[in-house]
Image: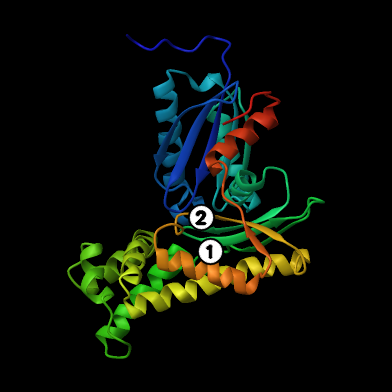
């Protein structure tokens, strides 16, 4: 039996979580029920470019609207948390993009950090340590004061991220090939992972789009670290220390050194390697002795829907 189209007075809400590798989009109805979700390509305009970001956002939104048999004019609220949207100019351009496509929607464009903080703590206090394609830490005190550390881009920041780990892995293979560094199991697997014949082919791939090489090398490093490859273990150990230092800086600036610190880990690097996860937890406990790990109760994309509903005055509870 064919699915009926939405009633003319229906209200729906979109939430986006977009970064340098992928975009998640969820659709909720006026009661806050999550109806469907999809994943599309990257939508951080500063890393992927605006054209690719527009394509990923449109592809994701079109897919959820198509599954629910609703139109763009049925959308009453949108919240998009995107990497790169901390820059006002980026947020304005993305906001205009959504306003043009969804004339009846109240639009809010914010950072992927803010929707992650919402996912972990709602409107309450806490710290998130985000590590995916990039990395950063954001903390919020009970009085609403926020502190952000990191996330300034792959060439000067993003320590401990998938990009950073992949870059270090490629460098380690290069040093091993030149007999300037220790041998590593990465050497036997790196080129095949990226379907590259040799170093020249891989270097050309990096020059064209480093985001298609370095972040995608992280799963290989994670796998080999769990198999006790010393170089992979060293890379992930250094990354764990760098990530912990981001959160430690936020703690110090919030003046939380002598109190319990609620902290949530968010992003694609977590849960991929038992070795890496253990290193991160150990470094966090060392840097922040009174850290209290908080699991995410909802996904950042679902949190974005909740924020869209709140901004639009909807009374439902996204869940």
Residue depth check, mark 2 versus mark 1: number of the one nearer the observer = 1
Say which residue label 1 marks.
153
Element assignment for label 1: loop
Give the label on residue 196, or none. none
Residue 119 shows up from this direction: yes
Looking at marks 2 and 1 on the same chain, the residue that comes earlier in the sequence is marked by 2
- Do labels 2 and 1 touch, CB within 8 Å? yes
Q: x, y (%) of residue 172?
A: 34, 80
Q: Residue 79, percent across and down?
A: 60, 36
Relative depth, front residue between 318 and 146: 318
Give the residue number, with chain letter if any, for mark 2: 46
**Quadrant where the C terminus is found in the figure:** top right
Q: Quadrant of residue 65?
A: top left
Q: Secondary structure at mark 2?
A: helix
Residue 205: percent from left, percent from top: 29, 64
Q: Looking at the rendering, in which quadrant would you find the N terminus?
A: top left
Up-down relation of residue 307 to residue 163 (above or below): above
Q: Residue furthest left?
A: 197
- Between the C-alphas of marks 2 and 1, the distance is 9 Å
Residue 140 placement, left or right of 75? right
């Amino acid at each position: 039996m064919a699915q009926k189209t939405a009633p003319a007075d229906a209200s729906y809400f979109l939430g986006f979580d977009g970064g340098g590798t992928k975009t998640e989009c969820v659709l909720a109805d006026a009661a806050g029920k999550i109806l469907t979700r999809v994943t599309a390509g990257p939508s951080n305009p500063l890393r992927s470019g605006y054209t690719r970001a527009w394509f990923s956002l449109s592809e994701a939104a079109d897919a959820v609207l198509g599954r629910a048999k609703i139109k763009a004019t049925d959308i009453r609220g949108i919240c998009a948390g995107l990497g790169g949207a901390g820059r006002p100019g980026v947020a304005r351009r993305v906001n205009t993009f959504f306003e043009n496509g969804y004339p009846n929607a109240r639009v809010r464009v914010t950072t992927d950090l803010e929707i992650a903080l919402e996912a972990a703590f709602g409107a309450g206090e806490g710290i998130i340590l985000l590590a995916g394609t990039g990395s950063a830490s954001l903390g919020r005190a009970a009085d609403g004061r926020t502190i952000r550390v990191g996330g300034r881009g792959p060439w000067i920041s993003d320590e401990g991220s998938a990009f950073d780990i992949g870059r270090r892995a490629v460098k380690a293979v290069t040093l091993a090939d030149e007999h300037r560094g220790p041998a590593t199991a990465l050497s036997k697997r790196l080129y095949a992972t990226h379907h590259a014949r040799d170093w020249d082919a891989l270097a050309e791939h990096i020059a064209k789009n480093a985001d298609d090489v370095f972040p995608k090398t992280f799963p290989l490093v994670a796998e080999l670290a769990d198999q006790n490859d010393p170089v992979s273990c060293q890379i992930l150990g250094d990354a764990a220390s760098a990530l912990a230092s981001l959160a430690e800086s936020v703690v110090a600036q919030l003046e939380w050194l002598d109190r319990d610190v609620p902290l949530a880990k968010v992003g694609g690097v977590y849960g991929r390697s038992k070795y890496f996860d253990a290193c991160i937890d150990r470094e966090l406990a060392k840097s922040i002795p009174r850290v209290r790990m908080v699991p995410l109760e909802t996904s950042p994309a679902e949190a974005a829907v909740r924020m869209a509903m709140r901004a639009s005055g909807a009374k439902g509870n996204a869940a």
